């Protein structure tokens, strides 16, 4: 259990969504994680579509107190993932997320790329909402990823849409270590 002051803990419990076609959804949630950790909150990020492959945020989280990242997804960047396996792993990750959220060990839980999992029909938005409704009080939840379903947008307390105006990929500049991963 967390030992943060009750004045902080009592104001937690909202659902935030970071979605849209622009860059910065995971990055925004990492900024929030950094801030929360600085206040003594216990933070967990569960990554739905990212494997444990030496991403910059994994390296940084090892150095930040009270911050754990669990990369439980498959590698969508380097290879084609069979749909049945993608569905199975996404469902297992959602079950693990539920266990961690319901454990009460964390004050802030980030479900990174879960919106993509729902928009790709790997997860049912209604099942995610039911999981969120049953969570203990005073646990802040963040859902990131493109294509947040309308049910999730309607359920959430805060929704931010990142819009791409321009991107270096358009100039042939690929993902860079320390910036994109």
Image (spheres, grey):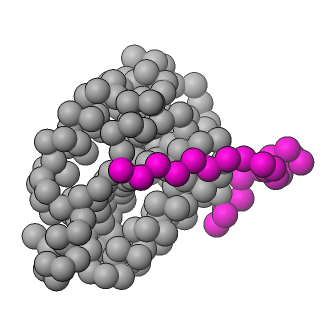
Residue at image x 38%, y 37%?
154
Location of the N terminus (image quadrant)? bottom left
Is residue 166 on the magenta stretch? yes
The relative height of residue 162 versus residue 115 in the rendered view (above or below) is: below
Q: Position of residue 4 (x, y in %)?
A: 18, 80
Using residue 54 as the reference point, say whether residue 155 is left or right of it: left
Rendered position, 100 above or below 179: above
Quadrant placement of the C terminus:
bottom right
Identify the residue at horizontal 48%, vertical 27% (top origin): 119
Q: Residue at x 27, y 35 (%)?
A: 129
Q: Quadrant of residue 156?
A: top left
Residue 151 picture location, percent across and down: 38, 30
Mainly helix, strand or loop, the magenta region? Answer: loop
Percent from the top left, x then y, of residue 98?
Answer: 20, 43
- In reply to whether residue 159 is colored magenta, the answer given is yes
Q: Which residues are magenta?
A: 157-179
In the displayed structure image, the side of residue 109 where residue 86 appears, left or right: right
Q: On the picture, is 81 further left or further right than 34? A: right
């Amino acid at each position: 259990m967390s030992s943060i002051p009750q004045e902080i803990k009592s104001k937690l419990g909202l659902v935030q969504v970071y979605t849209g076609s622009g860059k910065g959804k995971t990055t925004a949630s990492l900024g929030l994680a950094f801030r929360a950790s600085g206040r003594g909150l216990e933070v967990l990020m569960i990554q739905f579509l990212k494997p444990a492959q030496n991403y910059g945020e994994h390296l940084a989280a090892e150095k930040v107190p009270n911050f754990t990242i669990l990369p439980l997804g498959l590698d969508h960047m380097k290879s084609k993932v069979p749909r049945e396996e993608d569905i199975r792993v996404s469902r297992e990750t959602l079950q693990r997320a539920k266990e961690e959220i319901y454990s009460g060990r964390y004050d802030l839980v980030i479900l990174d790329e879960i919106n993509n999992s729902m928009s790709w029909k790997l997860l049912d938005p209604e099942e995610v909402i039911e999981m969120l409704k049953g969570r203990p009080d005073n646990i802040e939840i963040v859902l990131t990823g493109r294509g947040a379903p309308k049910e999730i947008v309607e359920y959430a307390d805060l929704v931010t849409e990142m819009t791409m105006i321009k991107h270096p990929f358009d100039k042939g500049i690929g993902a860079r270590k320390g910036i994109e991963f």
